[in-house]
Amino acid sequence: MKRCILIIAITLLTLHPLDCRAQDAMDREWILEVASRIEAAYGKLQSYACDIEGIYYEAGRELERYVFRFYFLKPDRFRIEFRNPYSGVTIFYTEGEKEFTSRPLAAFPSVQFRFSVNNPFFKSPSGQTVNQMHLRHFLGFLRDNARTLPQENTDFKYDGEILSFWLNAKDYVEGKLTERYRIYIDSRLWLPARFERFDMAGTPQEFTIFTNYRINPALDGAFFDSGYRDPAAEPVRP
């Protein structure tokens, strides 16, 4: 029911704009409501998997693309399988730890290395570290910025599946520069579908795209251990 109310309210808001101050307060509340819906969806999760593509820009031109398969098992286990670049590299991380394990060769699982989460060689081109990939990290980012920064011109839109809006926010890596983010949420799952990151001049910095979600697949806890080796391509039990 709350989902329907949120969507209807956003539709009415676009049809009947309010004055600037009321609009800012209303938009702030809608963003916080979206965050609450995501948190509720997260509360029902035990595990999920998705494909993630990161597109990085320099001076407005595409610089690099990263593609990987992301697995999560509550409460705190992560497995990241790189497809491009670094095909075959797998990272294993437990939330809260200061180090993660990198397994560079799938055919030789005993070859492993431990690295600090702050190791510069394992940061994304934007500077994101492995310990910033938790959905809770995104929820904190969304709520903190909705509450502390003006949220004018949020431009909420809904096409029946994807809800999108603009967010003014401090950069999600270091929290220093004010930027603009276009956030896309899959309202069927209440999980992120796409992030678009721009500087305040409108120059693209980074796009992140989430596809092929699997919600609550029966992932074995051993699958998140760096020594795990399964001859089956799909680690999900029927």
Image (cartoon, rainbow, N blue to C red):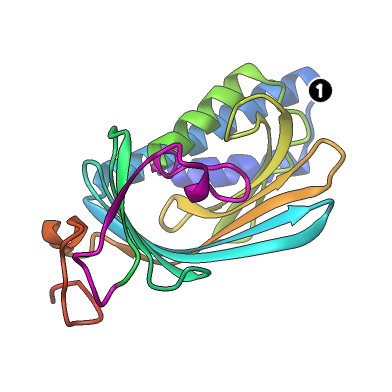
Q: Residues within 10 Å of mark 1 (few under 14, many from 20)?
A: few
Find the magenta span and give its range. 106-134
Nearest the viewer among 226 and 78 is 226
| Apparent side of residue 106 relative to residue 86 in the rendered image (left or right) | left
**Residue ID at (74%, 26%):** 23
Q: Position of residue 194 (x, y in %)?
A: 58, 55
Residue 188 vertical position relative to residue 183 in the rendered view, above or below? below
Q: Is residue 117 magenta?
A: yes
Q: Position of residue 161 (x, y in %)?
A: 54, 61
Residue picked out by circle 1: 20
Amino acid type, residue under disc 1 in the picture: Cys
Q: Position of residue 16 (x, y in %)?
A: 77, 37
Residue sitting at the far right: 201
Q: Is residue 36 magenta?
A: no
| Apparent side of residue 17 relative to residue 51 in the rendered image (left or right) | right
The C terminus lies in quadrant: bottom left
| Apparent side of residue 191 relative to residue 46 in the rendered image (left or right) | right
**Residue ID at (53%, 69%):** 85
Nearest the viewer among 159 and 153 is 153
Residue sitting at the far bottom: 232
Q: Position of residue 209 (x, y in %)?
A: 56, 60
Residue 106 vertical position relative to residue 180 in the rendered view, above or below? below
Q: How many discs mark residues in the rendered view?
A: 1
Nearest the viewer among 90 and 34 is 90
**Residue ID at (87%, 39%):** 201
Nearest the viewer among 131 and 168 is 131
| Apparent side of residue 173 relative to residue 99 in the rendered image (left or right) | right
Residue 231 vertical position relative to residue 176 in the rendered view, above or below? below
| Magenta stretch: dominant secondary structure | loop
Residue 19 figure quarter: top right
